[in-house]
Amino acid sequence: MDPLLYRVDAGIARITLNRPDKRNALNPELIAALREALESSSRDATVRVVFIAGAGKDFCAGLDLATLDVADEAGALEHLESAQRLADVLLAIRRHPRPVVAAVHGRALGGGAGIATACDLILAAESAALGYPEVKIGFVPAIVAALLRRSVTEKRMFELLTSGEPVTAAEAKTIGLINQVFADDEFQARSEAYVRNLAAKSASALSLTKDLLYHTDGMTLEKAIESGVLMNAVSRSTEDAKRGFAQFKKKA
């Protein structure tokens, strides 16, 4: 069975983590397939939105513990290479030219929560739970920390990482970790409607908005506004904007 399913439909690149018997736990093959799917979708001009989901009962339970048997005898270089592979996936999500949306149902834990956190938007089922339990086994969720810090307050982040306890979808929304919570029986339909609505937007506007958001991260106010001026001018010159202006004038 393929560890990941990938297809493009109506401008949506659909990525499904496909190890349901292992709760979609991350092993080297799944990580590599996810990285490849992200690269393929970034090169596909027909893709407007990337949609990541999990097969079975959970989004992703984190690192496949079976790989720890190998890790027990691994040296520093092997650990570094393994960590870098996961980091490359998270950065590929962040640097992807189109919006990347995670649809979280069941549990998203450890590296699974990291993948969701790296996405631009997170949709969650009401019964979903997200957590970073690494501290419970003497481990540090160090790679995802930089992304989590950009989603929640410092004290919330410290609590999430040091308690290791998962939070409900409702609480995750309250603290700003996720965007939308849908009832379990409506989750699939409403998530589908959400991404289709997003995919119907101007592709150039979506890409430029994402680029501006992350490009200005960490800038001073003055530099961020300067970047906004440049992006404003660039976006006005796109074909989508020209069509939008023309349609607006006809309605006026």
Image (cartoon, rainbow, N blue to C red):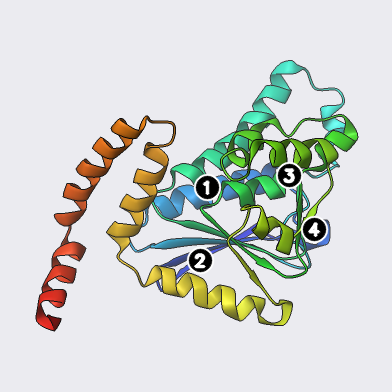
In the picture of the structure, the residue carrying the numbered disc 2 is 7
In the picture of the structure, the residue carrying the numbered disc 3 is 27
Q: Considering the image in quadrants, where does the N terminus appear?
A: bottom right
Q: Is residue 200 visible?
A: yes
Residue 113 on image: x %, y %: 70, 49
Q: Considering the image in quadrants, where does the C terminus appear?
A: bottom left
Nearer the camera: disc 3 or disc 4: 4
Question: Is the residue 170 above or below the residue 78 in the image?
Answer: below
Q: CA distance from mark 3 to mark 4?
A: 11 Å
Instruction: Tell me which numbered mark, 4 or 2, is placed earlier along the sequence.
Output: 2
In the picture of the structure, the residue carrying the numbered disc 1 is 36
Amino acid type at mark 1: Glu
Amino acid type at mark 4: Arg
Q: Secondary structure at mark 2?
A: strand
Question: Is the residue 153 above or below the residue 14 in the image?
Answer: above
- 43 to the left or right of 61: left
Q: Are marks 3 and 4 in contact (CB under 8 Å)?
A: no
In the picture of the structure, the residue carrying the numbered disc 4 is 23
Q: Can you tell which mark lies on residue 176?
A: none
Residue at 46%, 47% (x, y): give it: 39
Instruction: Tell me which numbered mark, 1 or 3, is placed earlier along the sequence.
Output: 3
Q: CA distance from mark 4 to mark 2?
A: 21 Å
Residue at 70%, 77% (x, y): give it: 183
Mark 1, residues whose alpha carbon is within 10 Å: few (<14), some, or many (≥20)? some
Q: CA distance from mark 1 to mark 3?
A: 14 Å
